[in-house]
Amino acid sequence: MELSDYIHKADVLIEALPYIADFKDEMIVVKLGGSVQEDPKMLASTMMDIAFMSVVGMLPIVVHGGGKAISRALKESGLESRFVQGFRVTDEASMKIVEDVIKNQVSPFVASLLPGKLVESALLPGDRIFFTVKKTGIDPETGETLDWGYVGTPMSVDTGPVREILRTRHIPVICPLGRGADGHVYNINADTAAAALAKALPSRKLAYVSDVPGLLRDPADPASLIPTLPVADVPGLIEDGTISGGMIPKIESSLEALRAGVRKVHMVDGRMHHSLLLEMFTTQGVGTQIVKQL
């Protein structure tokens, strides 16, 4: 390795230093998209980023969904996966499979990819601990009454268990399940769960890690990335179709989190090696950051 390469590495560390100092002891909620979870190398890179954040003094919190693992398990059981407006319709039989897969397969797998010699994790099922939900019954785009079965929207979040884990410097790994007033376990959209948790804490930042570079003006053109999105620009981008479909509830949840005290929301591409660190600890960033104002 050339001397210039070592100097460049030192420059990168110096660039990160003010961010490391500023974020010390700050809570950061990281939501892992299903596509990231499907690629072990991609997920391992992201989990190493999260471990780095913990080691330098930040307080990362991981929220994950079940995605394709749930779809595979339902298919193996002879049950059909049906989606309405991006939400999985979940009946009684399906809910039992969802709960088993997300708690006993996905959560342990995600936690296993944290480097155990550097950090420790704690699995935290949302239904037993802190998400209280109401049944989701309104189409977020049209306002139409729909029935997704056992799919819930968080109404309250008890952050005590999360804070207790963070006090031990462990990394909470949370699956998005909740419990309704009827005592039943409900599935929660992982984006919505992450935003609700970030809002309730409130965390310093909320980061969505998925398989897209961020918010694009043209979905077919990665070069059309919007690096910074002020809240005031969101209505116009929804109106012109730049923000559409499944991106709308994610953005709306992000805005709620910002209004509740979260300072920034980040959308980064988990396919890029160490994208989370590049977004958090460099001046330029690599994804889209959503901010209250410029």
Image: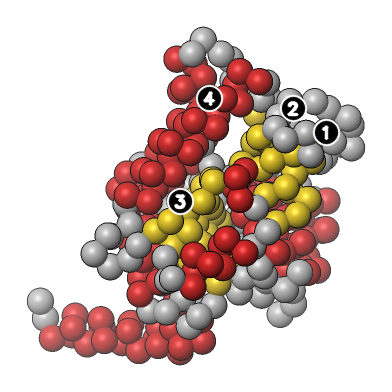
Q: Earlier in the sequence, mark 1 or mark 2?
A: 1
* Residue 122 pos. (x, y %): 43, 56
Pointers 1 and 2 in contact (C-beta within 8 Å): yes
How many numbered callouts? 4
Q: Residue furthest left?
A: 1
Estimate the x, y position of residue 224 in percent, counting from the top left.
58, 58
Q: Secondary structure at mark 3?
A: strand
Q: Which mark is residue 123?
A: 3
Mark closer to the observer (1, 4): 4
Tell me the element at label 2.
Answer: loop
Q: Is residue 11 above or below residue 216?
A: below
Tell me if 199 is positioned left or right of 43 in this view. Answer: right
What label sits on residue 97 in the rendered view? 4
Q: Is residue 272 left or right of residue 223?
A: left
Query: Does label 1 or label 4 sit earlier along the sequence?
Result: 4
Amino acid at pointer 1: Gly
**Contact flag, marks 4 and 3 (Cβ < 8 Å):** no
The alpha-carbon separation of the residues under discs 2 and 4 comes to: 16 Å
Quadrant showing the C terminus: bottom right
Identify the residue under disc 2: 148
Above or below, 70 against 141 in this view is: above
